[in-house]
Amino acid sequence: QANSALLDVFTLSQHGNLSTRHTEFGFEATVKETKLKDALREIYRELERAKRFGFTEAEVKTAFETRQKQSVENLTNSQWADQMINMVRYGESLRMYEESNELRKRFMAATTPTDLQQQLQRLLKDPNQVPFILLPKKLSSFSMFSDSSVKSMVAEVQAEPMNEHQQG
């Protein structure tokens, strides 16, 4: 949206630490100049909306289509190195591209939008969530963030009336 403080956002689905195997679910965002606090509020508002109402059919469909398009013909050296690191860090199987691609196709064929909606709701409503914010290295002032200002923003967003299809 034109009035958004965000330029780009994408999700990170990570494996968590090996001892607990808790899933980590995060976001990385590119933010308009001086709009970091507004962007944080915008992201949290969208998470709160999804937590209350789930994701719309269009959002789930887009997520499915995006995931299906993420299949690549060949792995780069960097991607292969990342797979080896994940094998060591998280105990993942190290698979060749062809095997991974075949498993991804089977997974996508066996997974329904309802399955995705349920998994996302489980992640969003997990009572053991631990939020954290990683700030950019070149942030000119840290005074805009404190525990109390973030807690205040969270409380304000949670108190907002929302409807199912409202975004941003």
Image (cartoon, helix red, strand yellow):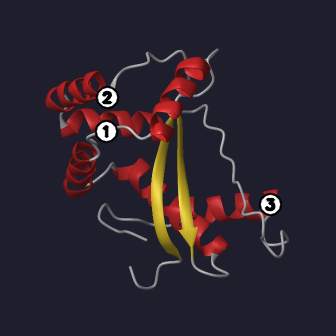
* Residue 17 image offset from top left, x and y in percent: 63, 24
Query: Given contact means CB atoms under 8 Å apart, are the residues at marks 2 and 1 in contact?
Result: yes
Which residue occupies the foreground of this view, 119 or 11?
11
Query: Given contact means CB atoms under 8 Å apart, are the residues at marks 1 and 3 in contact?
Result: no
Instruction: Quote the CA–CA distance across marks 2 and 1.
Output: 7 Å
User: Disc 2 or 3, which lies upstream in sequence?
Assistant: 2
Identify the secondary structure beneath mark 3.
Answer: helix
Q: From the viewer's perspective, is 81 left or right of 146?
A: left
User: Mark 2 belongs to which amino acid?
Assistant: Tyr
Q: Which numbered marker is on residue 74?
A: 1
Residue 49 falls in image quadrant: bottom left
Residue 4 vertical position relative to residue 130 in the rendered view, above or below: below
Q: Which numbered marker is on residue 148?
A: 3
User: Mark 1 belongs to which amino acid?
Assistant: Asn
Q: From the viewer's perspective, is 98 left or right of 32?
A: left
Q: Residue furthest bottom?
A: 2
